[in-house]
Image (cartoon, grey):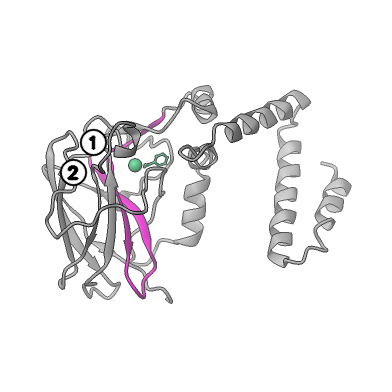
Amino acid sequence: MDADLTRQVEASFDGAADPRFADIMRSLVRHLHAFIADVHLTEEEWAAAIDFLTRTGQKCDAKRQEFILLSDVLGASMAVINVNHPTGGSATEATVLGPFFVDDAPEFEHGADISGGAPGEPCFVSGTIRSPSGDPIAGALLDVWQSDETGHYDVQYPELETPQGRGRLRTDDAGRYTFWSVQPEAYPIPHDGPVGDLLKAAGRGPMRPAHIHFKISAPGYRTLITHIFAAGDQYLQSDAVFGVKDSLITEFDKTATFDFTLAPETP
Ligand code: BEZ
Ligand code: FE
């Protein structure tokens, strides 16, 4: 490795006004140069990498974020989550947000049907939201979204005008949430772009095991973004985005029950 060059580029960030930016860039340069030396990257390979990143950018629009997908399939999204939400405490583990979250989902009453007519076997989902000391958290806000039995989210149907398998709920005084929906199904991440080409070149599949997404927030607690996964799904060991954590796997058999624990905002 050309240590002189690496030192020179690192030093070029010494005058940055933001010291955190300088730290991040120097570390990036060190790792990038070490990587290039490690694999003895050829000029053709570097050009192919630039072309790949160019195509990744060109695939992005208001609805498609190919760079996040790239981050997901490289495990970078999960690595960032793991750094920022270390496990070991009693809080429920976090996993990827994914591209199908919608900010303004409709609100539902306790026990309502959020399927909106989505095709699938009815499934009753319930549980409790608690603090690490076990106290129920009343009035916690849950955003829930999931695929239907064909493995599609509502936003993937261009013709569909109303939300399906998606909603916002609040916990009751006992910290409980309940809703009806449909059994979620495994599905492929979008793979008709450069990230799909990468998966193919790697001999990897695009599938994610069946799951329901949750985003749970309550005053005084860290917002939790996670899923619950269907036990027994054939893709639990080969999730395209490495999002599965054993603690998030639960039985789905017409009903699913899952209790969440939120971490306090200031530990
Ligand atoms: C999802 O679970 O919705 C998802 C996550 C990452 C990439 C694609 C989809
Ligand atoms: Fe999903």
Q: Do labels 1 and 2 touch, CB within 8 Å?
A: yes
- Where's the C terminus, which quadrant? bottom left
Single out the mark in the foreground, 1 or 2: 2
Crowdedness near tag 2: few (<14), some (14–19) or many (≥20) residues, C-alpha within 10 Å: many
Q: Which residue is mark 1?
A: 148
- The amino acid type of the residue labelled 1 equals Asp
Residue at (84, 53) in percent of width and height: 7
Which numbered tag is attached to residue 115?
Answer: 2
Mark 1 residue element: loop
Q: Quadrant of residue 215?
A: bottom left
Above or below residue 235? Residue 126 is below
Residue at (41, 30) in percent of width and height: 206
Residue at (67, 28) in percent of width and height: 51
Q: Which residues are magenta?
A: 206-232
Residue at (35, 53) in percent of width and height: 226
Above or below residue 36? Residue 12 is below
Which numbered tag is attached to residue 236?
Answer: none
Of 127 and 120, the residue lying toward us: 120
Mark 2 residue element: loop
Q: Earlier in the sequence, mark 1 or mark 2?
A: 2
Of 163 and 15, the residue lying toward us: 163
- The amino acid type of the residue labelled 2 equals Ser
Q: Quadrant of residue 14?
A: bottom right
The verdict on residue 222 being magenta is yes
